């Protein structure tokens, strides 16, 4: 696998949640710096075989904004 993509959203409780596309990986953290570390650790745990592990991790930010019309 060349890369794995995570959808990143702000959590209702504060912090961030990252969900992988095409793999059962979900992680969360309080800060962006911590999120990158948590995502990398989760990918290494999920793909314990180094040959199957993605070479790149892409974080795709999803942000909904609602305002009065």
Image: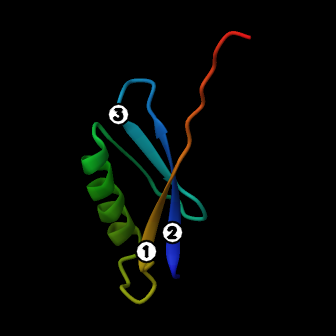
Q: Nearer the viewer, residue 40 or 63?
A: 63
- Image x and y of residue 62, in percent: 56, 42
C-alpha distance separating marks 1 and 3: 23 Å
Q: What is the image's colouring? A: rainbow
- Rendered residue at 28%/40% (across/down): 31
C-alpha distance separating marks 3 and 2: 21 Å
Q: Which of 16 and 43 is in front in this view?
A: 16
Disc 1 on helix, strand or loop? strand
Q: Earlier in the sequence, mark 1 or mark 3?
A: 3
Q: Which of 52 and 57 is in front in this view?
A: 57
Disc 2 and disc 1 in contact, CB within 8 angstroms? yes
C-alpha distance separating marks 2 and 1: 7 Å
Q: Residue furthest front?
A: 69
Locate residue 63: give its quadrant.
Answer: top right
Asked if residue 46 is positioned above or below residue 21 in the image, the reply reads: below
Q: Which residue lies furthest to the bottom in this view?
A: 51
Classify mark 2: residues with Cα within 10 Å, few (<14), some (14-19) or many (20+): some
- Rendered residue at 29%/63% (across/down): 41
Q: Which of 65 and 44 is in front in this view?
A: 65
- Disc 3: which residue: 15
Classify mark 1: residues with Cα within 10 Å, few (<14), some (14-19) or many (20+): few
Disc 1 and disc 3 in contact, CB within 8 angstroms? no
- Rendered residue at 28%/36% (across/down): 30
Residue 56 marker: 1
- Disc 2: which residue: 4
Asked if residue 49 is positioned above or below residue 41 in the image, the reply reads: below
- Image x and y of residue 13, in percent: 39, 24
């Amino acid at each position: 696998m060349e890369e794995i993509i995570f959808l990143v959203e702000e959590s209702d409780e504060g912090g961030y949640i990252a969900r992988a596309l095409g793999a059962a990986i979900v992680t969360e953290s309080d800060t962006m710096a911590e999120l990158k570390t948590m995502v990398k650790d989760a990918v290494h745990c999920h793909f314990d075989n180094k040959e199957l592990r993605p070479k790149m991790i892409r974080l795709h930010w999803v942000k909904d904004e609602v305002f009065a019309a």
